[in-house]
């Protein structure tokens, strides 16, 4: 019933004819095709597909119904990165007033090893004091860390001394069965190496995903769909519950749900597009403001006054690169390609 109502709603929605990329963050079907062509050109892992002939959308070219990239690796579950994924403060939040019940959109990112180290050092400095040799409180985190390192070294030396005492008399023992044990060792190992599937057990199976991007006529934005597999073997699709393990918990079963793909058979995990336009509008506005600031600071007031320092407007062709950048905040462990380095801030200006 739900899918039927959605199809009716989409059918009743008129096709967007005039560009609203800058004003609303949405695309016309023609702009979606132009952005898709640029993605395919810059990232050959992506390609156009026509899908089921009975599900062709008349407002798109028959051979360009949706974009797809296959066998995208997903080596880690999101839960395993829980400590290294940051959903920033207000600066990384886009508040949507009119759509999706006014919810906020959090843009997550992977915290680098250096940032994690700084966070740990700051926590160490904030949580407790370490006294120096004279009994004074150390003020710098470097001195605190050095003191901790000295304590660790001393503990390790003591442990090593205990081990030496424990095993000091091992040389006094003689094993009459050494040769027998050495002869028996290969026989003991042989069954494990020759057993069926032993080699497979030593190979780490990495999940893969087929990601596709369709055009949502109702929301007038791209929409991402995901089909996961337990490995590169597409005969072992993931269940909906398993696919949610690769989605940020803030979005699983809320923004990301299991639905029917509009062009191919089978249920897919999909990122609901209700906030896509508003978020894209915010990101594009911030990109323009950033480029304007950089131009005015490097070229000077005279250049800015002449118009040379004006904000550089992102092109329609850049849309999907920016779009895939913020989608990566929802599925940070699925390593799909969008090539270009895009700094996608959602801070309200």
Image: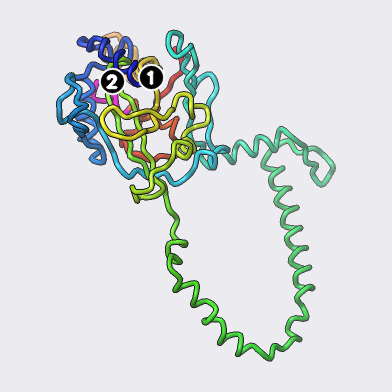
Label 2 SS: loop
The C terminus - image quarter: top left
Magenta-span inclusion, residue 76: no
Residue 120, image quadrant: top right
Residue 115 lies left or right of residue 149; in this view the side is left
Count the marks: how many?
Answer: 2
Left or right of 193? Residue 130 is: right
- Based on the picture, tell me whether residue 317 belongs to the magenta stretch: yes
In the picture as drawn, the residue positioned furthest to the front comes out as 1
Magenta highlight range = 312-321
The earlier-in-sequence mark between 2 and 1 is 1
Image-quadrant location for residue 309: top left
The reply to whether residue 259 is in sight is yes
Looking at the picture, does residue 211 appear above or below residue 250?
below
Q: Which residue is mark 1?
A: 2
Residue picked out by circle 2: 314
273 relative to 145, above or below: above
């Amino acid at each position: 019933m739900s899918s039927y109502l959605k199809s009716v709603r989409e059918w009743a929605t008129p096709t967007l004819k005039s560009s609203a990329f800058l004003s609303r963050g949405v695309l016309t079907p023609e702009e979606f095709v132009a952005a898709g062509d640029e993605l395919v050109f810059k990232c050959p892992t992506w390609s156009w597909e026509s899908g089921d002939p009975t599900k062709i959308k008349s407002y798109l070219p028959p051979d360009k119904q949706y974009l797809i990239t296959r066998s995208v690796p997903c080596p880690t579950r999101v839960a395993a990165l829980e400590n290294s994924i940051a959903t920033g403060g207000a600066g990384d939040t886009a508040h949507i007033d009119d759509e999706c019940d006014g919810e906020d959109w959090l843009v997550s990112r992977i915290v680098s090893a250096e940032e994690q180290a700084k966070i740990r050092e700051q926590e160490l400095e904030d949580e407790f004091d370490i006294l120096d040799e004279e009994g004074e409180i150390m003020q710098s985190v470097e001195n605190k860390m050095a003191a901790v390192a000295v304590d660790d070294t001393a503990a390790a030396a003591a442990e090593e001394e205990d081990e030496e005492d424990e095993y000091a008399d091992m040389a006094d023992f003689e094993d009459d069965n050494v040769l027998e044990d050495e002869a028996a060792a290969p026989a003991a190992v042989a069954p494990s190496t020759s057993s069926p599937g032993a080699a497979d057990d030593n190979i780490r199976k990495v999940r893969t995903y087929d990601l596709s991007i369709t055009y949502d006529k109702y929301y007038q934005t791209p929409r991402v769909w995901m089909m996961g597999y337990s490995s590169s073997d597409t005969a072992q699709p993931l269940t909906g519950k398993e696919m949610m393990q690769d989605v940020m918990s803030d979005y699983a079963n809320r923004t990301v749900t299991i639905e029917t793909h509009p062009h191919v058979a089978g249920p897919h995990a999909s990122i609901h597009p209700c906030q896509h336009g508003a978020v894209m509008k915010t990101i594009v506005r911030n990109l323009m403001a950033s480029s304007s600031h950089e131009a005015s600071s490097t070229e000077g007031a005279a250049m800015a006054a002449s118009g040379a320092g004006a904000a550089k407007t992102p092109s329609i062709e850049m849309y999907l690169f920016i779009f895939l950048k913020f989608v990566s905040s929802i599925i940070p462990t699925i390593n799909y390609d969008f090539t270009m380095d895009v700094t996608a801030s959602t801070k309200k200006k």
